[in-house]
Amino acid sequence: MGARADALLLLTRLAIDWHDEYDLSLGIDTAAWRATAISPEENRRWYDEQIAAETDVERLKNLCAGRAYCAAGHPVDAREGALRSYEAVRAQLPVLLELLDDQGPEIRTKTAYLLGWFPEEADATLLPLLACLNDERDPVCVATVLVSVGLSADSGTTSTTSTPCRAGPPPPP
């Protein structure tokens, strides 16, 4: 695997390599994930409440250290930390979309796979993914694009098209 393919794999793992929130056949429910992630503000409030009520000196010391860590911007909640990674990769999707036109099928395949995990970006990713199918000859890339299109189109967040893939003839006008 080349450096660029390695980088795409790393971005994918950075964004979604935690195993309790997603399933290939169902995609990722980012709304539920965001709802369950504990924000830094919530963590600081929790620490403040615990510190105010704590009488044990050693526990108080540990709570103050935890609050300081949280106040410095470090994620305390694993879901919130993972969400930060996901959002960092999501911010780069406009640049990554260009890789769907790469000469290497491995790069196109890994890019298509990565894009499928961002259902909130379906309006921006669906049409480029579908366009990828026009000239694609690599069967692994075609299959990966189709899975990503399915995950994106089924997310309920897209307004680009209501039926990106249709079997059979088009409906009568």
Image (cartoon, rainbow, N blue to C red):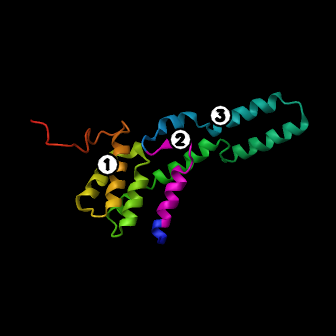
Determine which of the numbered discs, if any, sits on residue 21 in the image: 2
Compared across the picture, whether 100 is left or right of 49 comes to left
| Label 1 secondary element | helix
Q: Which of marks 3 and 1 is nearer the N terminus?
A: 3
| Label 3 secondary element | helix
User: What is the x, y in percent for residue 151?
Assistant: 38, 44
C-alpha gap between disc 1 and disc 2 = 22 Å
Residue identified by numbered label 1: 126
Is residue 95 at least partly visible in the picture?
A: no
Q: Residue at x 43, y 47 (%)?
A: 118
Is residue 140 at least partly visible in the picture?
A: yes
Magenta residues (range): 6-24
* Neighbours of disc 1 within 10 Å: few (<14), some (14-19), many (20+): many
Q: Toward the viewer: 43 or 103?
A: 103
Amino acid beneath label 1: Leu
Q: Residue at x 26, y 44 (%)?
A: 164
User: What is the x, y in percent for residue 68?
Assistant: 75, 44
Compared across the picture, whether 33 is left or right of 122 comes to right
* Neighbours of disc 3 within 10 Å: few (<14), some (14-19), many (20+): few
Amino acid beneath label 2: Glu
Residue identified by numbered label 3: 42
- Of the residues tagged 3 and 1, which is closer to the observer? 1
Amino acid beneath label 3: Glu
C-alpha gap between disc 3 and disc 1 = 35 Å
Residue 171 drawn above or below residue 136 = above
- Of the residues tagged 1 and 2, which is closer to the observer? 2
User: What is the x, y in percent for residue 89?
Assistant: 49, 54
Q: Toward the viewer: 79 or 58?
A: 79
| Label 2 secondary element | loop
Q: Does the magenta stretch include residue 84?
A: no
Compared across the picture, whether 173 is left or right of 27 comes to left
